[in-house]
Amino acid sequence: MREKGVIRRSKDAVQKELSSYNELYQDSASADKRKVQHKTLETNYYSLTTDGHGYAWSKSFHCVNRFHGETFGESIQRHESYLALRMQLKPEDKVLDIGCGVGGSLRRIAHLTGAHATGITISQYQVQRARTIDKNSFVSANCQYIQGDFMDLPFENNCFDHVYAIESRKCFAEVIRVIKLGGSCIGYDMYLTDKYDNQNHDDNEIIHMLESSFDLPEFKLTRGLISDLKSVGITAEENRIIPEADIHSYQRLEGYDSFLSLNHFLTSPLGRWLGLNIIWLMEKTRIVSKGIAAISDMCQKSAKSGLHAGKLDIVTPMFFILARKPEL
């Protein structure tokens, strides 16, 4: 669905963002270089892929497991509601969503709890999309969106009761600054499991593809997150891999339930192949901007690498963490 009021970018802007992004994932580009240029990397990535992810994942861009009899949309809501439950949010609380995308999770948590939710994303395009969705959906005033850098949050010290992040892990030093004493930091993220073998060529190829496809300078093992939290003074109260349910998180990419809806079909192997070729034809006939097919190919590669990593169990998209800023 095309939201009213969203300003589309020019053909030149799309091509420039794509070229800049790809340069940082050439063989000669190191993880250190990507870390240094993380702001450019992330801004270009989300500007390029937001629309494509929206067709397949709607307004919540994250992985979930599912139970039999549960729709994909219901599993997303369960996933997000669990975060709200564990934070024990109250209507008077202020909560920060780090990496809010177009606001799918933020709206759900704000509606469920009545808390005032602020979302931050590095992409101005996502902020624009989120605000437009709210306006068209008559969303209440307890949701707001800000463009900013996770590594330099534009907020005062100790101003949020709770912080959550879904697949956005690069910000712990800033989290402990903006969160109130005793406040919780909670989220899910994508990490390497102990089954990953850094001496295995195939494992490394898959991980490099995931890094380039999901805007990750470098993957870490789950224990790396605990070390990162300790280094900035955050106490980890709980950390675990959320076990896969009846329907694994990667099975949607394999074509599970692809006959149920257009969104399900678009994420299946056949749907992805058809979509890529249709977009290629549209680009050749100048119906869409040059570079759109390359962006579609990027999304296709992310699906393939995610599917392979899921089957090999070398990556988990659902490493859960509940941490807290210590009371003085």
Image: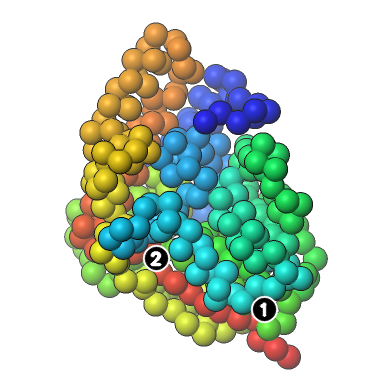
Q: Identify the secondary structure beneath mark 2.
A: strand
In the image, taking residue 7 as reference, residue 287 lies left or right, namely left
In the image, taking residue 9 as reference, residue 140 lies left or right, namely right
In which quadrant of the rendered view does residue 239 lie? bottom left
* Residue at the image position 19 percent from the left and 53 percent from the top: 202
In the image, taking residue 243 as reference, residue 3 lies left or right, namely right
Q: Can you tell which mark lies on residue 318?
A: 2
The residue under label 1 is: 183
* Residue at the image position 47 percent from the left and 49 percent from the top: 61
* Residue at the image position 51 percent from the left and 62 percent from the top: 80
Q: Is residue 39 visible?
A: no
Q: Amino acid at mark 2?
A: Met
In front of the other: 107 or 213 = 107
In the rendered image, the residue lying farthest to the top is: 285
Q: Residues within 10 Å of mark 1 (few under 14, many from 20)?
A: many
Q: Is residue 125 visible?
A: yes
Could you tell me how many numbered marks the image carries? 2
